[in-house]
Structures are given as C-alpha cells and as structure tokens.
Amino acid sequence: MRKSLVIIGTIIFILGIILFGVGTYLSGSSIIKVNKWYNYKADIWISNEINSTGGEIIIVNVSKNIYLINSTELGLINKSNIKSMSQNSIANTSTGLTFIIQKGSYYLVTFSNSTPSIYYYYAHESSLLINGLILFLGIIFGIVGIIILIIGLVLKPKKVISNEIK
C-alpha cells in the first residue's frame, strides 16, 4: 500500500504540474497586449479598433483620461463630451481601468500632445475563466499529489506476524 500511495501521489503531482503549465500557457496566449496609438485629430489619440463578439475584457494600465468609445460615436467626440459618450468601466483602481464590452466595435481614446505610452490588454471573458479553472485545478492536483506522496513516504511498512508453529 505504501508503494502504491507514492506512485499515485507522484502521478497526481505530475498531472498537476502539467495542468498548471497548460493553464499558464493558454492564459498568456489568450491575453493580447497592445500599445499602438494613432493620432486621430490634433491631440486625440485612438487605439486600434477593438471588434467584440461580446464579453471581452479590456484592462488599461492607467486610471485616468482614457475612454472606451463606440466606433459609431468616434467622429462626435471632443474634450467636453467624451465623458458622457464613453462606456463605464467596471473597475477603476489607482493602477488601471477594466471594461467588459458587449458586441460591437470600440476604440480606446485619450488626449495627449504626443504618442501615449499606455498599454492595454484584452481577452475574451470565457477563455480567461476556462484557463483560470485549468490553473486552479493544476494547483489543487499538485497539492493533493504532494500530500498523498508524503503520506506514502511517511507510512511505516506493515509488520508481518509469523504464524509458524515450532
């Protein structure tokens, strides 16, 4: 039994490492990092067009003066009306903004005298959830594998009772 626990623990631990690696790789490849900005008008800078099928998450690495605008309203924006025309963020922290966007085409817009050095990241919400689940399962399997492995190594072998008649 001791040997089988060590083998089972090792297999579960290795499976956990594989799941964690796959989840990490998939998470990294499903998040797109962009820092390209285009001068739209005078001091208005826009991102690439972001085409959404619904449920994309956009994270911007600054917390102010960045706006998510529907592409149909891009020609109407200026400094005085941009706040009322922009989509609301779901999170606004000191380090950035987070948006979840619905189906449609959008631009990130900012005002600057020179090319902004702002990064933004986007990914589909469902892929992040699935990849996060794979990562979580990898961690759980790894922990369970280590526990079973330790139990298998710590268990004392059974004492054999001899029934021989002398």
Image (cartoon, grey):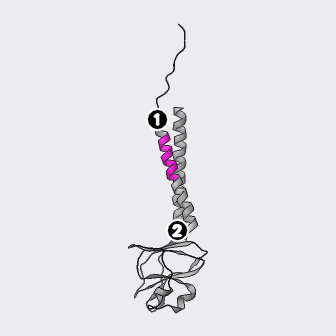
Secondary structure under badge 1?
A: helix
Identify the residue at image location x=55%, y=35%. Answer: 4
Please give the residue where the numbered disc 2 appears in the rendered image.
31
Secondary structure under badge 2?
A: loop
Amino acid under label 1?
Leu
Total numbered circles:
2
Tell me, for residue 129, which label it has, or none: none
The image position of residue 77, as x and y in percent, is 50, 90
Magenta-colored span = 138-148
User: Which residue is more in the foreground, 100 or 13?
Assistant: 100
Please give the residue where the numbered disc 1 appears in the rendered image.
153
Is 149 drawn above or below residue 77 in the view shown?
A: above
Is 154 drawn above or below residue 111 in the view shown?
A: above
Identify the residue at image location x=52%, y=42%. Answer: 10
Q: Quadrant of the N terminus?
A: top right
Q: Is residue 54 magenta?
A: no
Q: Which quarter of the figure has residue 71?
A: bottom right
The image position of residue 48, as x and y in percent, is 53, 81
Identify the residue at image location x=50%, y=48%. Answer: 142
Give the residue at the far top of this rendering: 166
Is 44 drawn above or below residue 130 in the view shown?
A: below
Amino acid under label 2?
Ile
Q: Residues within 10 Å of mark 1 (few under 14, many from 20)?
A: some
The image position of residue 15, as x and y in percent, is 55, 48
The image position of residue 161, as x and y in percent, is 51, 18
Q: Is residue 145 magenta?
A: yes
Identify the residue at image location x=55%, y=40%. Answer: 8
Q: Residues within 10 Å of mark 2 (few under 14, many from 20)?
A: some
Question: Magenta part mainly helix, strand or loop?
Answer: helix
Tell me if label 1 and label 2 are in contact, CB under 8 Å. Answer: no
Q: Which quarter of the figure has residue 53?
A: bottom right
